[in-house]
Amino acid sequence: MATSGVKNTTQKITGFLFILLGLAPLLFILFITLRKEQVRYRMKQELKYQTLQTVIVSENEVVWMDKHEIWVNNSMFDIHTKKLESGIYTFTGLYDKDETMLVEMERNAAGKNKEQNRLLVRLFKSLPFFCSQLNDIQSPTNQSSPNNPVILKISLHPFREIPTPPPQIC
């Protein structure tokens, strides 16, 4: 009876951890989005009062981030004005260090996805909840030991096959 309470508590804690793991990427995206909006608002204010810089880039080399920002010289550049003549863009605006850091954070996070997936696989394997479920599935005749591992057969069909037809009601 006491094992059942511990098992339920372990399952609840494990479920809560998985909810947190599932929400972590969403919270990260939300944080980055809100921070970008805050930086964009600040940059709009600075575009009015700061001394603007001019950047000249050929049309085929422009990396547009959105319709008011470009990526140039490994930095975000907020555009105040733009002019296209003979395949050459002339942009006037400001470099945005804060938004550059946010974009780099996003790129680094995207690159770390593979590493995070490996960590999640290790986490799943090490959680006691899954180990106890595997032990429940094993039959008493197939006890596992280091010398005799149990190979579980997982059915592809969720329902058992019935070899005979169901009874007929007359």
Image (tube, rainbow, N blue to C red):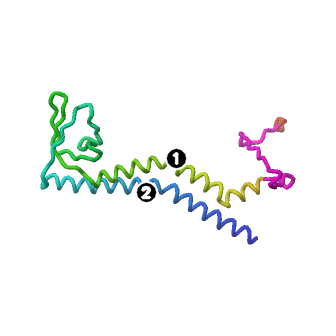
Total labels drawn:
2
Residue at the image position 57 percent from the left and 50 percent from the top: 118
Residue farthest toward the bottom in the current orientation of the protein: 2
Q: What stretch is highlighted in magenta?
A: 138-162
State the separation of the CA atoms marked 1 and 2: 19 Å
Q: Quadrant of residue 43?
A: bottom left
Residue drawn at 78 percent across, 46 percent down: 151
Kindly identify which residue carries mark 1. 114
Above/below status of 129 relative to 77? below
- Does dot 1 land on a helix, a strand or a loop? helix
Position in image of residue 13 (x %, y %): 60, 65
**Mark 1 or mark 2, earlier in chain:** 2
Q: What element carries label 2?
A: helix
Main SS of residues in magenta:
loop
Q: Does the magenta stretch include residue 2?
A: no
Instruction: Specify the amino acid type for callout 1.
Output: Lys
Amino acid bearing label 2: Leu
Position of 132 compared to 19: left or right? right
Residue 58 in view here: yes
Looking at the image, the residue that sits furthest to the top is 86
